[in-house]
Image: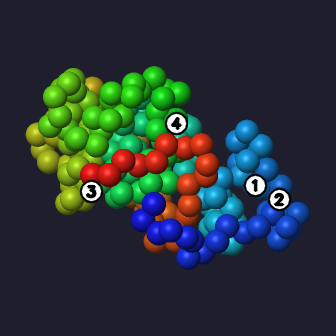
């Protein structure tokens, strides 16, 4: 975690009004409202509008889940967003990513062991993070395995998680217990 404590603390459950309680109950996982949602509950209109887009990216996108999680993990790594990393290591494992693949995400697209398409996907994340543009060569490599909708969903996935990482890091949203901590560089 880049900050040891939040700059904007999660809204305590005792301060939730009925509308907030009802909305956050839909976001519960295993009986828990994650800190990201309880923090955004301090701005209910933003929370409601953002979760529509985030819901598309995470649950209704045309991307295969494995590739989506590789992209999200790479964004989290590049942004040094420990909260995002911890949650998406868990989601990635549920989607079939191995411990070795997750570890290799940190080493980037040049790491030995990636299939060419996986390396291109990670390279595209790196290019978007560094320059807000996917190079022609990387675009062609991704387009060899993704259709136009998947290409658009990929771009918006990377952008969504860059945005979220900026918020998480700057606000200091703290990772809940039980999630894997981001390893050092």
* Spot occupied by residue 60 in the image (x, y as percentages of width and height): 55, 37
Q: Is residue 161 left or right of residue 6?
A: left
Secondary structure category for the residue under label 1: helix
Mark 1 → mark 2, Cα distance in angstroms: 5 Å
Q: Depth check: 173 or 133 in front?
A: 173
- For residue 21, which numbered disc appears in the image? 2
Secondary structure category for the residue under label 4: helix
Quadrant containing the N terminus is bottom left
Mark 2 → mark 4, Cα distance in angstroms: 26 Å
Q: Residues within 10 Å of mark 2 (few under 14, many from 20)?
A: some
Mark 3 → mark 2, Cα distance in angstroms: 36 Å
Q: Disc 3 designates what residue?
A: 129
N-term mark: 3 or 1: 1
Q: Is residue 82 visible?
A: yes
Q: Disc 4 designates what residue?
A: 90
Which quadrant would residue 31 be assigned to in this image? Answer: top right
At x 20%, y 51%, the residue is 127
Q: Residues within 10 Å of mark 4 (few under 14, many from 20)?
A: some
Secondary structure category for the residue under label 3: helix
């Amino acid at each position: 975690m880049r900050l040891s404590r939040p700059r904007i603390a999660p809204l305590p459950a005792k301060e939730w009004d009925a509308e907030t309680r009802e909305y956050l109950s839909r976001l519960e996982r295993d009986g828990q409202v994650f800190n990201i949602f309880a923090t955004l509950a301090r701005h209910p209109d933003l929370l409601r509008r953002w979760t529509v887009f985030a819901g598309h990216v995470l649950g209704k996108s045309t991307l295969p889940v494995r590739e989506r999680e590789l992209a999200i993990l790479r964004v989290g790594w590049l942004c040094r967003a420990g909260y995002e990393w911890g949650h998406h290591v868990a989601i990635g494992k549920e989607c079939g990513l191995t411990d070795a693949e997750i570890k290799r995400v940190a080493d980037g697209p040049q790491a030995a062991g990636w299939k060419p398409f996986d390396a291109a996907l990670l390279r595209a994340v790196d290019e978007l993070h560094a320059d807000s543009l996917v190079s022609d060569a990387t675009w062609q490599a991704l387009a060899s395995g993704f259709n136009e909708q998947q290409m658009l969903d990929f771009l918006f996935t990377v952008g969504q998680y860059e945005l979220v990482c900026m918020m998480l890091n700057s606000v200091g949203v703290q990772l809940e217990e039980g999630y894997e901590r981001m390893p050092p560089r």
